[in-house]
Image (cartoon, grey):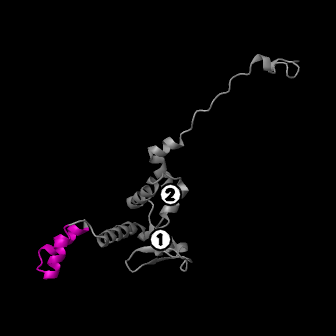
Amino acid sequence: MLRFIWRLRTRGRKGSAKEEEALKHEDGPLSPQELQNAETHWLKESQKTLKDSLSKGGFRNLSLYVDPEGVVRVGGRADKALVSYETRHPILLPRDHWISRLIVQHAHQFGHPGVVATVAKTRAKYWIVRAHDLAKSVKFRYVVCREIRARVESQVMADLPQSRLAPFTPPFHHTSCD
């Protein structure tokens, strides 16, 4: 979609030979840079719904900051940890946005783990507000997870034979030896 918008904006302009060459190469599959730009664009769009909460200081304990790309990230004390930058400073996302739901569904699809494991997978890159509740609702909506969680029939034990319930029977009375 972003490629299409860019093409519409640059179509009427006369550009240099370098720009013309760039347009020709943009006909094929999406490049990694384009995919990264699209992801950043949609993350910024989803964070616009958090503006009111951010201005009121609703997430003060998360020590939020804005990275150079303009994405709001969660700060913390793990700056010297030997993990990726995205794991140390996950991107803050609202719970009620469709992007958050898609991210949680994607994390849940691989292996259909429980709620806690799904939240742990998403926390590697994103900090979704009330992620536990969102993961719970995603798990509840998956038919496969309902089938896995279904209770199996319990077996009812048969009645004991009368010979085992007879009073005053001496021990080993109903047994034999070869």
Vertical arrangement, residue 8 with respect to residue 108, above or below: below
Q: CA distance from mark 1 to mark 2?
A: 15 Å
Vertical arrangement, residue 112 with respect to residue 156, above or below: below
Give percent across and percent down for residue 71: 40, 74
Task: Looking at this view, name the residue that lies furthest to the bottom.
Answer: 16
Disc 2, SS: helix
With 11 as the anchor, is 144 left or right in this view?
Answer: right
The answer to whether residue 130 is seen in the rendering is no
Disc 1, SS: loop
Q: Amino acid at mark 2?
A: Thr
Residue identified by numbered label 1: 90
The answer to whether residue 40 is seen in the rendering is yes
**Is the residue marked by circle 1 packed among few (<14), some (14-19), or many (20+) residues within 10 Å?**
many
Vertical arrangement, residue 133 with respect to residue 52, above or below: above
Q: Amino acid at mark 1?
A: Pro
* Residue 31 in magenta stretch: no
The residue segment tinted magenta is 2-27
Q: Residue at x 55, y 80 (%)?
A: 80
Residue identified by numbered label 2: 118
Looking at the rendered image, the quarter that the C terminus falls into is: top right
Q: Quick one: label 1 or label 2, which is nearer the N terminus?
A: 1
Q: Is most of the magenta stretch helix, strand or loop?
A: helix
**Is the residue marked by circle 2 packed among few (<14), some (14-19), or many (20+) residues within 10 Å?**
many
Closest to the observer, 66 or 156? 156
Closest to the observer, 147 or 131? 147
Give percent across and percent down for residue 43: 38, 68
With 166 as the anchor, is 22 left or right in this view?
Answer: left
The quadrant in which residue 30 appears is bottom left
